[in-house]
Amino acid sequence: MSENTPQNVEQLSVNTIRTLAIDAVQAANSGHPGAPLGAAPMAYVVWQKFLRFNPQHPEWPARDRFVLSAGHASMLIYSLLHLTGYPEMTLDDLKNFRQWGYHTPGHPEFFHTKGLDATTGPLGQGAAMTVGMAMAEQFLAAKYNREGFPIFDNYTYSILGDGDLQEGINHESAALAGHLKLGKLIWLHDDNSVQLDTATLKAESEDTAARFRAYGWEVLRVQDGNNLAEIGAAVQQAQENKDQPTLIQVKTVIGFGSPRAGTSKAHGEPLGEEGVAETKKALGWEYPPFTVPDEVRQHMDAAQRGQGFEDAWNKLMDEYRASFPELGKEVDAVLAREVPANLAEILPSYEVGGKAMATRNASGEVINALAKVLPTLMGGSADLSGSTKTTIKDGGEFLPGSYQGRNVYFGVREFGMAAAGNGLSLYGGVRPLVGTFAVFADYLKPAFRLSAIQMQPVTYVLTHDSIGLGEDGPTHQPVDQLAMLRSVPGAHVIRPADANETAAAWAMALEYDKGPTALILSRQDLPILPRNHAGVKKGAYVVKDTDSTSGEGAQVILIASGSEVSLALDSADALAREGVNARVVSMPCMEVFRAQDQAYRDSVLTPGTKRVAIEALAKMPWYEWVGSGGAIIGMDTFGASAPAKVLFEKFGFSVENVVKTVKGIL
Amino acid sequence: MSENTPQNVEQLSVNTIRTLAIDAVQAANSGHPGAPLGAAPMAYVVWQKFLRFNPQHPEWPARDRFVLSAGHASMLIYSLLHLTGYPEMTLDDLKNFRQWGYHTPGHPEFFHTKGLDATTGPLGQGAAMTVGMAMAEQFLAAKYNREGFPIFDNYTYSILGDGDLQEGINHESAALAGHLKLGKLIWLHDDNSVQLDTATLKAESEDTAARFRAYGWEVLRVQDGNNLAEIGAAVQQAQENKDQPTLIQVKTVIGFGSPRAGTSKAHGEPLGEEGVAETKKALGWEYPPFTVPDEVRQHMDAAQRGQGFEDAWNKLMDEYRASFPELGKEVDAVLAREVPANLAEILPSYEVGGKAMATRNASGEVINALAKVLPTLMGGSADLSGSTKTTIKDGGEFLPGSYQGRNVYFGVREFGMAAAGNGLSLYGGVRPLVGTFAVFADYLKPAFRLSAIQMQPVTYVLTHDSIGLGEDGPTHQPVDQLAMLRSVPGAHVIRPADANETAAAWAMALEYDKGPTALILSRQDLPILPRNHAGVKKGAYVVKDTDSTSGEGAQVILIASGSEVSLALDSADALAREGVNARVVSMPCMEVFRAQDQAYRDSVLTPGTKRVAIEALAKMPWYEWVGSGGAIIGMDTFGASAPAKVLFEKFGFSVENVVKTVKGIL
């Protein structure tokens, strides 16, 4: 290692990545040394020879994207961030891997650490998000690039482990990417034939290359995962094929160089002091822990070339703005995720007493109104666009090789769709919406959670929101789904009571940029209530108060959401006839109401007044609002197959039962 | 149609299936006519020529299994149940398709309708459950069959739509089945190239045959989905290949015979009176609605051959019991899902003050104790068996061609694993356990829901149950998962506080046969509490009461689960030192506690006494128990990456914070 020839510095760089990784895992006494040891060469080649990024400006929008789907190999990317010169990633961070307050959490956390393009760890999802990123790039390129102005033009890379490929979502996202011919998407498979429990041969026998070819991918093979030239040639070839995404299978040895090399023992435990020493010996490494040799630092520092990339792009953008002033403004606005100031005027309004309307239909109208002012609002549904009303009319179809369309056919791939939604959002510039039946939120839950962890404003349009969908029966009727979604930190779940609340809900979704919003919409028609966007935007508000002429305050507060608000209103009328004064509160969004000040909350839910909550879903979320002495009318069981009207009656969502319940607690 | 030749009666039978289906959909004015019209011939061939079942005894354990994975085509199977002579499925049921109180819900509901082998509708899962059924058959056959006594020996069939194949779970389950060489598993793909939104070509371009070959399946093709002989030959060929599962791609026309044939309009809407009339004309059908021609009824009635199948098997079983009395008893016991009466003696016991122990480790010991007395307790983990402690030592490995092992390598396929768990359970005789990290319950939620809907006692071993897992960070730390699982009707979620509660929890799981049980287990060691199985089995109990010598009742009740029970105990001690009398309640299972009588519930949670709940997870489920004026110490955000001890401190799970919180509400 004394002669500083180019070959040597490359090998030395690879080994620096490796030794930083095992030193950090050892210092934490926790983590995964195996994958960084095996995958360091391919990561090095991608970052050093191909990846366009600027460490001084991690958010530079034209950068290539890189997602370490095998997130447990996090030290691989932390080492790279440090070595290429991201200022935030200090040697101290590496030394404090997995400790409180450092930039080196156990798995890569977007927002927590600069230079990451996504949060990864839950297997399969990292690569699945890169499909969304590649879609975003193609969509924005098709929309905004002009002859001589390739302002959106980047590659998207991911490194996947064997586990990523076993997950179901890999089928959905790889099939989608192959179908869409996302030629600038490149996946590198860290093909080490070892997983946590065992050698992969005990758990799988698939011919992965054949599977990917069946999806329409090009598949390349690198026989020696330590051969930098071979890896480089494969990436080069992948870049040149613009008509197909490429999977590069790189044969590696897990825990390369360590005494546990090639075994599952190398996967997820520190090597031990002795193991680290032996590994370093095998790698010909003679430095103290956490050493970055000077020549490696010099060789890998990307500050200068990164700034060069960005300067060139900034110049291109300036020329673009000069040549296409309107478009230039639009691109700047979409990259800044701007929301029109006059949103309230744009949103459709519905007259009280007008024709009853399903909130999914109202949502469809709102989407189409918004699409006119939000040029990058796009997305689609998991083969239910006719039912979820997510289609942007005249928005065109997003199809293989024809990427300017705003309507994506995601296929029956809920999870892949939602992960693509995360990728579309993470890329920047795009406002993704994804849709399915509320009950099938189950299928995409892991991606919804990642929307929240990554604070991505993906809008989930979830329709057919209760037993109110009727005949399709229990498998299709959400009961437990709202408790599931509402318990995810940082997510907003909005269940509007009518068409006007639906418009307000959409405005809230656009204005909330710290996480996903799930819009929970009815299949069935609902009566139109007075427009009260201000009330909706506080999460809950008084729809109807007791008769002021009576001089009495409310004896009971009926709290409801969605389709049950009109039931609450009818019930309040019935109660009034029996001399009981009931206030009706619509609570479309608990998370937002919870964030209001005590005074507002008390003004809606008067302390001391008994409460009955009504929602045709699991009761769990409502105990917070009814408190002791109240009651909840909800679902304790799954639903059934019958017309909606019959079901509401049978399961107790009737004026009669509400009146009875109120009387029971007064 | 006048000459009653065999050919004619066959065609007439197929058309009877079709016309019953469209008549029922039309009567309901709701449902899916397209798939039954297209897939009737293949369903007819399987049921009429191959399927071994007994309509008088739908639960006959040696029957072939048939799962309509494309559950929206439910009228296909209801027609078959009626025509083959299941007494429960009357013409009146068909006429009242999708109505309250009939056996014909919108999607097939196991338990609700006799003759179904599974609940289907959520796409992908029906076929995925058949993988578990085929595994169960092979496991029981390997274990109990003897030379000349093939007591477990059946085929498992499924019909899949294009949507089933797009779902991610299809990758997991097909890869698993191919890997395991489940040669008696036969899937028929209703290959009509149309899905709800569109022709499939807008959403996919995969070569499905190549994909399945990559998994190790045999793939056959039937070019004309109306050719009964061609279908029959393919099924025959599939049966003969015992070394590979077989996918038969049957080219069909969705909505065959109808004016909407071959379009997505045929998928999910009634055809209309006129459409029905035109379809019948095209099919040469001249009868009034809901007619079953006599010759069809005679031809398809399976009562006699069904009884013949069962009689032969009963005879075989009698001889088996005579030849192998011990084994015979064991087979009868496992098929009756018996639990040993002396369970309490079998379960390990742990001494108070003994070595602290992670509940996952205790669970591992319990599993191994139970495995000795429950010969068909089997299952595994999604590539985390070392972490979830689900391995049955000396239980052997369940591997391709070697099916007597009790430890399955499910691979990183949480959803496929849980669906296989449902199939293993639905088959009968097997007690499946499946395991992963609690946070990855997200990935298998749709199957957990189906465990509950189908009332299947699958045991989910979910470990690493809070921020207490430490360094792996937010993506791996459950926060929202317990609210998700606890909101599923009929499921039991048990979070034991120590090794003794873990043993009791396992007993509860075995004794509960109306749904799944999720055991929520710690990664970290927990102190041992006094053994109190009776208390645990009531869902919640008093662990420690206030000092009786003080003569005062409790001023506050600390309610906790899992690792937070010992924190509550320490906090009670600290409160006592400050003169505050606190009762400590362990609440491992809310669902079971909720089912206790009021008197018991009041004896644990004294009405009027203020309460503080402590659980290092989302607060939502706890509002029910603390009521007004109480407090919850839980997680409002995602966790972080750091050692567990640091995280508990930082997020408020400390004696100091509990004491402060209690003082704040008193």
Image (spheres, coloured by chain):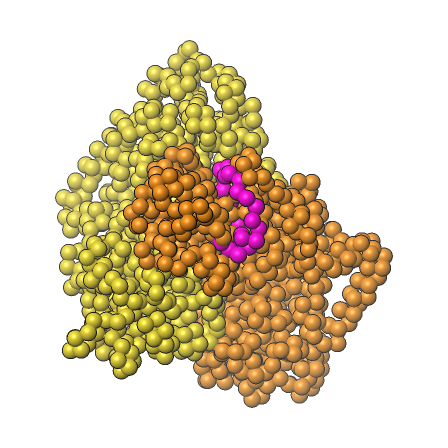
Chain colours: A yellow, B orange
A195 or A606, nearer to the observer: A606
Residue at left offset 57%, top offset 53%: B534
A267 or A395, nearer to the observer: A267
Does A480 sit left or right of A592 as displayed?
Answer: right
In the image, residue A121 lies at what x, y percent?
43, 41
Q: Is residue B442 visible?
A: no
Q: Quadrant of residue B81?
A: bottom right
In the image, residue B266 lies at what x, y percent?
46, 73
Chain part drawn in magenta: B517-540
B300 or A539, nearer to the observer: A539
Which image quarter holds the N terminus of chain B?
A: bottom right
Residue at left offset 51%, top offset 55%: B539
Residue at left offset 16%, top offset 44%: A321
In this rendering, the count of numbered labels is 0
In the image, residue A243 lies at what x, y percent?
41, 46
Does A581 sit left or right of B276 as displayed?
Answer: left
Seen in the picture, residue A539 relative to B56 is either above or below; the reply is above
Say whether residue B536 is magenta: yes
Q: Is residue A577 visible?
A: yes
Residue at left offset 48%, top offset 51%: B542
